[in-house]
Amino acid sequence: MYRSPFYYDAIYWILMIPVLILSLYAQFKVSSTFRRYSSQPNRRRITGSQAAYEVLRANGVHDVQIRPCRGSLTDHFDPRDNTIYLSEPVYNAGTVAAVGVAAHEAGHAVQYAVGYGPIRIRSFIIPATQFGSKFAFIALLLGLALYSQPLFAAGIVLFSLTTLFQLVTLPVEFNASARALSTINSAYLLDDDERKGAGKVLTAAALTYVAALLSSAVQLLRYLLIFAGRSDRRR
């Protein structure tokens, strides 16, 4: 049965508006929570770099470097040079937020060291995801302009790789946070009330990944609806 393009657009926006609101809320929550606990020194005066080292040591990982990097919220683990990069507000800062963020990035290093399944899958699909992100929209636009269903379908497949990457990223991020909080607890890096603050920082960060997945999934649904609508018109 043929349906107007407006029907599919209405479905898309009904789903997308709440996702956009969630994305804005997640960004606000990350910045506000990080700012709040970045101004709260932890009682043991443990810096971000020290917290990262403790997580690595507790998990038997000894070949990972810990280095500072510029910016704010630019913290990450780079498996290519086996190095944890901590931002300026984290590396030498003895705050609750610094410990939480640094421990989380160390959690990623531990994941690579122990061969954690989801992170191996994510690493495997990164080249395909990068290729898909570059050429998906080209294929989609050409498919629309030339009214080519095979080309448009190819664009959908390429774009779906991004959604798959976001999906695999969720367990990776949640597991890194779980590893971080477990070590913070077992090594007594923070007091009980401070651990709750670090948990809030990591929960806020995780919300951004949930929003990114939902946004990508809704966008993928939109392309699928367009494809279905064009198929209806050809009948």
Image (spheres, helix red, strand yellow):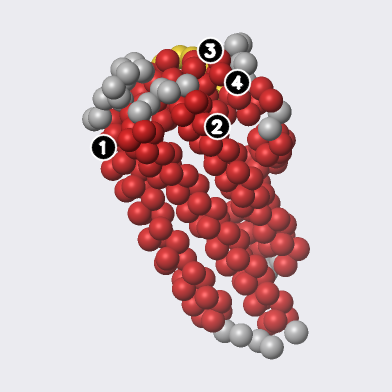
User: What's the amino acid at mark 4?
Assistant: Asn
User: What's the amino acid at mark 2?
Assistant: Arg
SS at badge 3: strand
Q: Nearer the viewer, residue 129 or 200?
A: 200
The residue tagged 1 is 36
Give the position of the N terminus as an image quadrant. bottom right
Cα distance, mark 2 to mark 1? 23 Å
Q: Nearer the viewer, mark 1 or mark 3?
A: 1
Q: Is residue 67 above or below residue 22?
A: above
User: What's the amino acid at mark 3?
Assistant: Gln
The residue tagged 2 is 179
Residue at the (45%, 14%) spot, across then down: 67
Residue at the (65%, 77%) spot, across then down: 229
Q: Nearer the viewer, mark 2 or mark 1?
A: 2
Query: Residue 139: x percent and y percent?
Result: 66, 55
Query: Residue 223: x percent and y percent?
Result: 61, 65
* Circle number at residue 59: 4
Q: Nearer the viewer, mark 4 or mark 3?
A: 4
Is disc 1 surrounded by few (<14), some (14 to 19) or many (20+) residues within 10 Å?
some
Cα distance, mark 4 to mark 3? 15 Å
Cα distance, mark 2 to mark 4? 9 Å
Q: Earlier in the sequence, mark 3 or mark 2?
A: 3
Cα distance, mark 4 to mark 1? 29 Å
Instruction: Kindly tell me whether residue 24 is visible in this rendering.
Output: yes
Q: Earlier in the sequence, mark 4 or mark 3?
A: 4
